[in-house]
Image (cartoon, helix red, strand yellow):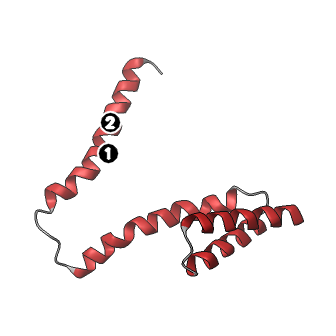
Amino acid sequence: MNNLQFWIYLLILSGSTYLIRAIPFAAVRGKLRNRFIRSFLYYIPFAVLTAMTIPAIFYTTGHPLSALFGLIAAVIFALMKKSLTVVAVAACITVYAIEWLL
């Protein structure tokens, strides 16, 4: 790839990224009053994070079974209202223990 190609790609990427962020600000002037749209926009970050995280969980371990046990441990600790650090450490220890047993 030469320099000209790189700068063209960079401009296209930055332009599309800017438009994705700028269009909602230009289109919506006041506060959103529709409850459905507000709740939809509230849950988008959680849905995107879940869609990005769950596949990575199952492909980063040696066995899908250890990944499943790690996910279950993380969900249990999260439902017990533990901190993010505790949830992550519990999931890692669970995966490590299951990998060691397998």
The kind of residue on which mark 2 rests is: Ile
Identify the disc placed on residue 12.
2
Residue 102 seen in the figure:
no
Question: Which residue lies under the disc numbered 1?
Answer: 17
Question: Mark 1 to mark 2: distance in Å?
Answer: 8 Å
Secondary structure at badge 1 equals: helix
Q: Position of residue 32 (x, y in %)?
A: 17, 72
Q: Position of residue 79 (x, y in %)?
A: 57, 80
Residue ID at (44%, 18%): 2
**Looking at the image, residue 100 lies above or below residue 71:** above
Which of the pair 58/96 is nearer the observer?
Answer: 96
Which of the pair 20/83 is nearer the observer?
Answer: 83
Q: Quadrant of the C terminus?
A: bottom right
Identify the disc placed on residue 79.
none
Q: Are marks 1 and 2 in contact (CB under 8 Å)?
A: no
Crowd rating for badge 1 (residues with CA inside 10 Å; few <14, some 14–19, many 20+):
few
Which of the pair 13/92 is nearer the observer?
Answer: 92
Residue ID at (31%, 77%): 39
Q: Earlier in the sequence, mark 1 or mark 2?
A: 2
Give residue 76's quadrant in the image: bottom right
